[in-house]
Image: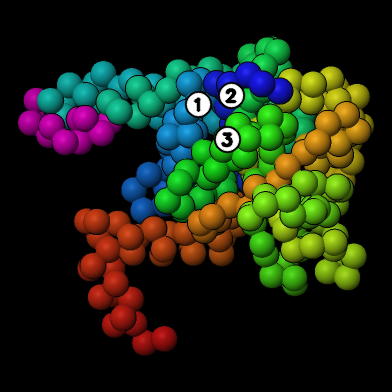
Amino acid sequence: MKQKVRKAVLPVAGLGTRFLPATKASPKEMLPIVDKPMIQYIVEEAKESGVEQVILVTGRGKQAIENHFDTSSELERILEQKGEEKLLREIQKISNLVSFCYVRQKEALGLGHAVLCASEAVGNEPFAVLLGDMIIDSETPGLKQLMDVYEHYKDPVIGVSRVEQSEVSRYGIIKANQVSSGVHEVLDLIEKPSPEKAPSNLAIIGRYILPPEIFDILERTSPGANGEIQLTDALKKVLDNTALFACEIKGKVHDGGSKLGFLKATVELALKNPELGDDFRQYLKGLDL
Ligand code: UTP
């Protein structure tokens, strides 16, 4: 793979069952962390990493995501009339972040299937995948860190992060050889292993740079765990033909799709917020913990 990564696929068609009842009628990816929906953090990360086009894989009940990234002339007119310049610029910025394209996953048949739905929109070029509920709080944007590894090795790259040994069974875990500081060559991938069987504590955290060949592989991948087409199963087959690297993300990774992960992200990002941070810190200090 030598081409530049121009496109990113953001699958947002999942049912969000871990976050019910909040997600019964609202998309999980639109839940706000401080003052921005989770999906906006992800789109901003993609843009800051050099992505030009974002392909959102949506499903039933996800229209709020499309509306969020569309222009809103009525709202803009009102803000203009009220002289709310700063807010107006912020609202306009959202729809101008990147170029957006939407494809539909008719049924939530798994992450691998969601990525496959974007095959025509991606075409024959390497592309990024960013999960809509994993928030990375880092100095260098998470995907940019993968892009740097990709530039160097010219092979597919996945983002990983070290997790507690007791938590490995919640993630895809890699078996790998370290090749340089924070970079590993992947030898195998194991979906949700028990702590005794896990070959490492390096967990796959929802950032990928993939070759277009993954689409043919996904097409031939039969449903795995929970009857879903798993991206991890397809990645294992990528290993048959090419090297695959893992980039240890420098920064904090929050699983915004789980209630506890979402709360942690909210507290940490609120503390860093220039407008709210100081007051929020004071408030937390005053709590009887
Ligand atoms: P998750 O497994 O975290 O999301 O998938 P989910 O299925 O919505 O959540 P739970 O497990 O039921 O609580 C990671 C990302 O992949 C998308 C989700 O929207 C989420 O952003 N996804 C998942 C799809 O687009 N389609 C699917 O079939 C499954």
- From mark 1 to mark 2, how far is it between C-alphas? 7 Å
Left or right of 117, for residue 8: left
Circle number at residue 79: none
Residues 85 and 137: in front is: 137
Left or right of 227, for residue 55: left
User: Is the CB of mark 3 within 8 Å of ligand 1?
Assistant: no
Q: Confirm or deny contact between disc 3 and disc 2 (CB under 8 A).
A: yes
Q: Amino acid at mark 2?
A: Val
Left or right of 98, for residue 277: left
Residue indicated by mark 2:
5
Give residue 267's quadrant in the image.
bottom left
Q: Is residue 83 covered in magenta?
A: yes
Q: Does dot 2 land on a helix, a strand or a loop?
A: loop
Q: Does dot 1 land on a helix, a strand or a loop?
A: loop
Structural crowding at the residue carrying mark 2, measured as other residues with C-alpha within 10 Å and reported as few (<14), some (14–19) or many (≥20): many
Indicate the position of residue 206 as horizontal and vertical percent values. Answer: 64, 44
Residue depicted at 77% across the width and 38% down the height: 244
In this orientation, does residue 2 appear?
A: yes
Q: Confirm or deny contact between disc 1 and disc 2 (CB under 8 A).
A: yes
Structural crowding at the residue carrying mark 1, measured as other residues with C-alpha within 10 Å and reported as few (<14), some (14–19) or many (≥20): many
Indicate the position of residue 215 as horizontal and vertical percent values. Answer: 79, 22
The N terminus, quarter of image? top right
Of tags 3 and 1, the one toward the viewer is 3
Residue indicated by mark 3:
147
Give residue 286's quadrant in the image.
bottom left
Q: Which residues are magenta?
A: 81-91
Closer to the chain start, of discs 1 and 2, is: 2
Q: Amino acid at mark 3?
A: Met
Closer to the chain start, of discs 3 and 2, is: 2
Residue indicated by mark 1:
51
In this view, 236 is above or below 169: above
In this view, 202 is above or below 36: below
